[in-house]
Image (cartoon, grey):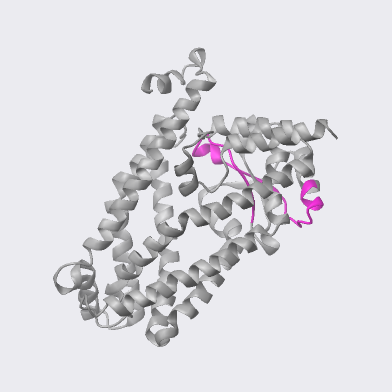
Amino acid sequence: MEDIIQNSLNPQAEPTKEERQKIAKEYSSVHNQLFLLDTILTFMGLVMIIVGGNSGISGRISTALSIHIPNNWLLVAGYVVIINTAYCILFLPFNFYEGYTLEHKFKLSNQTIGAWAKDKLKSFGVSLVLSLIIMEVTYWLLRVSGGSWWIWAGCLWILFSIVLTHLAPILLMPIFFKITPLDNNELSERLKNLAQKTGANILGVFEMDLSKKTKKANAAFTGIGNTKRILLADTLLQKFSHEEIEVILAHELGHYYYSHLWKLLTFGVVSTFAGLALCNVALNHFVSTLGFTSIADIGAFPVFAIVLFFFMLITLPINNTFSRHLEKQADAFALDTTRKPEAFISSMNKLAEQNLADTNPNPIIHFILHSHPSISERIKMAEIFISKRKFL
């Protein structure tokens, strides 16, 4: 396998389709193993900081902070900064291997170590700010709302996710990518016309410099309200034809046409309230047993995190099954709207090759971890579309 990966660098020894799929399966396998390792390490870390005398490390951090910081808002902020920083430092080797070493090994990354580190610092900063907002509001509700805190928290979490979706294209994405209007009038007009057919009023078509980070290709229809826009990675523009890009964007617009964002939001509402209700039960049951003063004690946060962690793991296959259903609808929309199944198939093959996607993943792993149908399933849908067209 190592020889095949190394040979893929040599243009005179381009790997065959079969060899490339072997590489893709190896790449996918490593990512699956890393997911399992990350899950185990995260759980162990949460357990380790809550067990032991004085309510564990978490309790001692909370107690030490409360001695010097009597204000509850500042106490929560101090705890969040310490825990987030500690997590980032402890998992840095893991993240470096997954985000830098592995991507370079499989010849997918274009980043230097310095660029990767800069991105990591940006991610840490954004994550810290978002965590502070969520945690401050949640623990304020825990202090003032009594047993109904989780209902109010659920409402505010959902509102926050909507606001974030609205602001992401103009506030968050420019932190990591340079985004400029697409300098290709023909393609831009083609995609705008496609958007109009679906009833999507978009701000415009934009290009992002994904090639500074990776060789992978991507495209998206992002934002809600007056921030809706089409985003095309420069890596996509370099290797895909206009017809292939049109089909890919038709898929993204299918999500808009069928209101998938709002369906996912509705699905998320149920999931959020169910998870927070379980957290409420767990906090009331375990907090006093573990030696914490109340459910609003920030030191008991690992109990909160462990419950949400397991809830998300248990519901992951359900979430992904629902997501795959929506993705199939978007694929069908792309085929019906563009009537270009050949371009759909060629775009899927190019995406598989450029992104090192496993076209035929293990069915069990696919069911649990994958939010999209496999490439082979998506191509089969297009082939069925072609066969039906021949009989019309």
In the rendered image, residue 223, in percent from the top left (x then y), is placed at 64, 58
- Give the residue drawn at x 41%, y 21%: 6
* Image quadrant containing the C terminus: top right
The answer to whether 297 is drawn above or below residue 48 in the figure is below
For residue 26, side relative to residue 250 (left or right)? left
- Give the residue drawn at x 56%, y 72%: 159
The answer to whether 216 is drawn above or below residue 316 in the figure is above
Looking at this rendering, what residue extends furthest in the top direction? 12
The answer to whether 35 is drawn above or below residue 159 in the figure is above
Q: Is residue 361 magenta?
A: no
- Give the residue drawn at x 73%, y 44%: 334
Residues 234 and 54: in front is 54
Residues 67 and 12: in front is 12
Q: Is residue 243 visible?
A: no
In the rendered image, residue 366, in percent from the top left (x then y), is placed at 49, 43
- Give the residue drawn at x 29%, y 65%: 82
Q: Magenta span covers which residues?
A: 194-222
Q: Is residue 202 visible?
A: yes
